[in-house]
Amino acid sequence: MVVYDLICSRGHRFEGWFSNLEDLEDQLGRKLIACPVCGDENPSRLPSTFGLVKSGRPNLPEPVPPQAAGELTVEAAREFFKRWQDFSEQLEREYDDVGPRFTEEALKMHYGVADRRNIRGLSTATQEEMLRKEGVDFLKFPLLARKTPPSSDN
């Protein structure tokens, strides 16, 4: 399954899970996808979030244990977002931000043209599909926005 970020004509953002890009395009063409907020049947695909490449998988934040009857307490939500923020900060510290050159840099490392290193950056769905076909292991993960700029003493 592939997750695509979508936006309706009224600006509501949401995501959809599809078998592949062709499945998404088919469903969009047949007006089978509607905005969950307003029901608009004309959404479009947004550029994808960034990806990560590392020799091994990064340590993802531990999931928050499910609450009784599916209820999420305020404390559990705070703990989840705290872990997400900590992980986002770890990625900022330990991964080189290559921005829109992510696919190019990942392929260089994959084929031994460049030394392997931890990178993060931006990619489109088409680029991600190409990376998958080439056998490049990567992970999409949205970083939480910072309230304050990073300190210069890292």
Image (cartoon, rainbow, N blue to C red):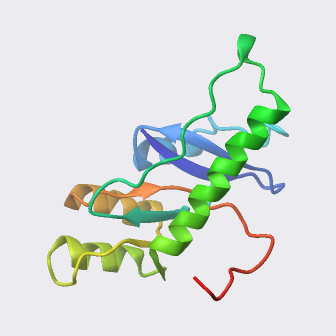
Q: Position of residue 51 (x, y in %)?
A: 45, 63
Using the image, determine if residue 122 lies above or below residue 2: below
- Describe residue 48's horizontal placement relative to residue 7 as left or right: left
Q: Position of residue 87 (x, y in %)?
A: 57, 57
What residue occupies the far front of the structure in this picture? 153
What residue occupies the far top of the structure in this picture? 69
Quarter placement of the C terminus = bottom right
> Foreground: 70 or 107?
70
What residue occupies the far left of the structure in this picture? 112
Image quadrant in which you'd find residue 68: top right
Q: Which residue is painted at 32% across and 79% down in the image? A: 105
Quarter placement of the N terminus = top left
- Describe residue 144's horizontal placement relative to residue 36 as left or right: left
Image quadrant in which you'd find residue 70: top right
What residue occupies the far bottom of the structure in this picture? 152
> Foreground: 36 or 122?
122
Q: Position of residue 31 (x, y in %)?
A: 64, 39
Using the image, determine if residue 57 lies above or below residue 73: below
**Circle count:** 0
Is residue 35 in sight in this rendering?
Answer: no
Q: Which residue is painted at 38% across and 66% down in the image? A: 127
- Describe residue 21's horizontal placement relative to residue 112 as left or right: right
Image quadrant in which you'd find residue 92: bottom right
Using the image, determine if residue 95 lies above or below residue 79: below
Q: Which residue is painted at 81% across and 27% down in the image? A: 73
Q: Position of residue 108 (x, y in %)?
A: 23, 79
Is residue 34 in sight in this rendering?
Answer: yes
